[in-house]
Amino acid sequence: MEGAPDDTAVVARVRAALAAAPGARDAIVALLDRAERDGRLPRTFTIAADGAAAAALREVLSARAVRAQVGGRVRLDLAAVPVPDLAAVLYAALDRAPRDPRGDRERRRADLVAALAAVSAPRHDVARAFLAAERADAEAGRGETAALAERGELARAVAVVVDVARALDALLALDAPIRVASFAARVLGDSKALAAGSDRARRLGAALLAHDPATQADVAVGQPSSYDAAVRAALDARGLVRDDAGVLVHVFGPLVYARTGAAPFDHVARHARLGDPSPLTAAQLRDAALVELPARRVTIFENQAPFLDYVERADPATELVVLARGQASWAAVLLLRLCRRVGVPIRHAGDLDRSGVLILRSLARRARVSVEPWHMDVATHRRFAVAGRPIGPEERARLERLVAVDDPGAPCHELLVELATTGVWIEQEVFSHLLLGPGLDSTTHSDAG
């Protein structure tokens, strides 16, 4: 190929050759893309090309500049092309203006940094930490927000950050669980904004996991199997539920509650007199007011079998018995907030392991009540350790990390130390029937934590 960059005949000939062989045109496009990334044309460039494409490239660049290679590839030796300004000819033939990807990236990054700097400061510490992290990532050109801006979606990138910050502020001010669609509509103006699997829902859960210690602690209790599961658990822990009518707690005892515009509900107490526990939902308890709870204490069980065993011998007139079923549901939390109003002592019995301790602590924090450990002490562990099971290496590492930073005054701290020392954990079902058998006064056993 001969001619100067402004030689319209040369440009026309190149344009025609590339139009006749799409593969050759794709190769030249890739070559210019590479030149724009590097800031200059490379000396050599290897690319896949079929026979027609290779022939067209020889016509465009000269036979000496195009060498066939094994596997349907060609090597372009651009130093051998007899054109003073090859890039200008190729740009003209493609009707393409030179671009500056690096400069474009820097401009988009600067635009993102400026846009995030203009976002108003959120109210909550967690939301402010999220926004600060997003600004730092924008400065460094990393993360999902920067990737969106890099693709030219600056408005969308900033809108997601603003929505997540706004949702964090509102979510961390919640006093009770709320349906996701209702929350999204009221806070973000779109009931589908936090639909399962959506970018905003995922980013909101990730922000809680990254910046909210309380959420981190609650999610760790369940040991989610994947990061996606942890994100979903984070949203649930903060009170975003798909259906609050399906969030249950089972309870037994003399509970009577009321809801606005309705007569008092005494079905829990009536069922208890027949020996039956009753399910209550978060929806039922959301706006409930306590009418009567003539109980001398509240006893919470982590696991179902000990709960059912205990109910068989509990006095339905003097004790409220609650099944937490692992990490307590929002229905259990709302129930304990009702119980808090009468000031009766609350105790919790669970597995003698790290999760059992964290479940107790999480329940106390979420319900804002004082919860005493019951049969979750060193003496009980030593009494039944022979029936325990070895703690696996990963769980033992988690336990040791917790013990290293745990407050010695926190509930069950001594039990955590014992677990770390012995490497043995004990299921509640292994020993509860021996402590809570028929006719046995459970108050004669240690209540120490």
Image (cartoon, helix red, strand yellow):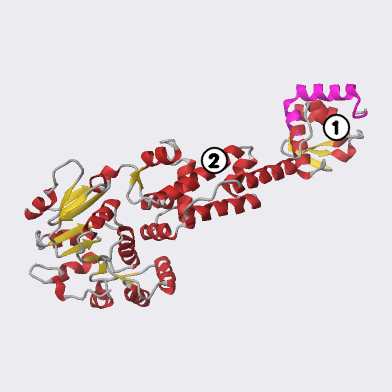
In the rendered view, would you say 288 is above or below 361?
A: above
Residue 281 coordinates in the image, percent (x, y): 24, 47
> Could you tell me which secondary element the residue under label 1 belongs to?
helix
Residue 386 coordinates in the image, percent (x, y): 25, 75
Quadrant that contains the N terminus = top right
Q: Main secondary structure of the magenta part?
A: helix
69 drawn magenta: no
24 drawn magenta: yes
Q: Is residue 2 left or right of residue 224?
A: right
Give the crowd class for mark 1: few <14, some 14-19, many >=20 residues within 10 Å: some
Q: Nearer the viewer, residue 15 or 269?
A: 269
**Which residue is located at x 38 percent, y 38 percent?**
181
Quadrant that contains the C terminus = bottom left
Highlighted range, magenta:
4-27
Residue 432 coordinates in the image, percent (x, y): 19, 67
Q: Is residue 58 visible?
A: no
Q: Nearer the viewer, residue 310 or 290?
A: 290
Residue corresponding to mark 1: 88
Residue corresponding to mark 2: 159
Q: Is residue 227 left or right of residue 375?
A: right
**Which residue is located at x 43 percent, y 35 percent?**
190
Quadrant position of residue 319:
bottom left
Kind of residue sitting beneath label 2: Ala
Q: Is residue 449 visible?
A: yes
- Mark closer to the chain start, 1 or 2: 1
Residue 61 coordinates in the image, percent (x, y): 85, 32
